[in-house]
C-alpha cells in the first residue's frame, strides 16, 4: 500500500496490491485485488470526494467524506451494500482504518475490515 499526494498536491491517492508482490497469493479471490483511491476536497460541497477503482473485479465506488467528531467518515451509497470507511486515531505517522458495510441503508454498520497503518 502506498499513500501520497498527486495532481500537484490537490489530491491524495493510495495504491493497493493485495497480497503484496512478496507475499504468497491467497486462494480466496475476495482477498486478492489491485486498486486505487483518489480523494480531493471539493469546496463546492464542503466535503471530500473519493473514488475507489478496482479493475480486477470491475468495481468503482464513489464516496463522500466528512469529519465526524475526531474521525473522518467516507460513505458510499451508490451500490449495494452501502459502504463506510472510517479513519480513526489519526496521527502524524499512523491511523486506523475501518471498512464497514450496511444492508439497511446506513441505519446499522457491520465491521468487515480493520487496518492499522504506520508511516515508514
Image: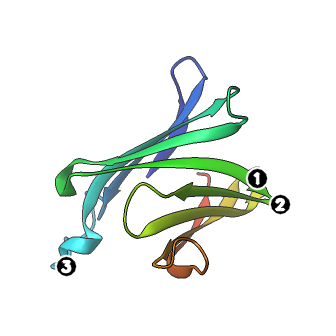
Between circles 3 and 2, the one closer to the viewer is 2
112, 34: nearer the viewer: 112
Between circles 1 and 2, the one closer to the viewer is 1
Q: CB of mark 1 within 8 Å of CB of mark 2? A: yes
45, 85: nearer the viewer: 45
Left or right of 24? Residue 115 is: right
Q: Which residue is mark 2?
A: 70
**Which numbered circle lies on residue 28?**
3
**First in sequence: mark 3 vs mark 2:** 3
Q: Residue at x 74, y 58 (%)?
A: 90
Element on which disc 1 rests: strand
Q: Position of residue 28 (x, y in %)?
A: 19, 79
Q: Position of residue 55 (x, y in %)?
A: 22, 48
Name, please, the residue furthest toward the right. 69
Left or right of 95? Residue 120 is: left
Q: Position of residue 20 (x, y in %)?
A: 31, 60
Q: CB of mark 3 within 8 Å of CB of mark 2? A: no
Left or right of 112? Residue 28 is: left
Alpha-carbon neighbours of circle 1 within 10 Å: few (<14), some, or many (≥20)?
few
Q: Residue at x 56, y 29 (%)?
A: 11
Q: Residue at x 53, y 81 (%)?
A: 111
Q: Residue at x 83, y 60 (%)?
A: 70
Alpha-carbon neighbours of circle 2 within 10 Å: few (<14), some, or many (≥20)?
few
Element on which disc 2 rests: loop
Q: Which residue is mark 1?
A: 67
Element on which disc 3 rests: loop
Between circles 3 and 1, the one closer to the viewer is 1
Judge whether 110 appears above or below 59 on screen. below
4, 54: nearer the viewer: 54
Amino acid at each position: 500500500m502506498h499513500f501520497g499526494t498527486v495532481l500537484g498536491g490537490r489530491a491524495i491517492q493510495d495504491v493497493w496490491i493485495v497480497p503484496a508482490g512478496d507475499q504468497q497469493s491467497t486462494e480466496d479471490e475476495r482477498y486478492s485485488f489491485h486498486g486505487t483511491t483518489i480523494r480531493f476536497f471539493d469546496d463546492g460541497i464542503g466535503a471530500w470526494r473519493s473514488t475507489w477503482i478496482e479493475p480486477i473485479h470491475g468495481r468503482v465506488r464513489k464516496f463522500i467524506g466528512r469529519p465526524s467528531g475526531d474521525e473522518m467518515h467516507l460513505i458510499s451509497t451508490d451500490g449495494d451494500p452501502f459502504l463506510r470507511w472510517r479513519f480513526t486515531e489519526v496521527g502524524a505517522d499512523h491511523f486506523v482504518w475501518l471498512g464497514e458495510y450496511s444492508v439497511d441503508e446506513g441505519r446499522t454498520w457491520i465491521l468487515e475490515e480493520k487496518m492499522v497503518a504506520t508511516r515508514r
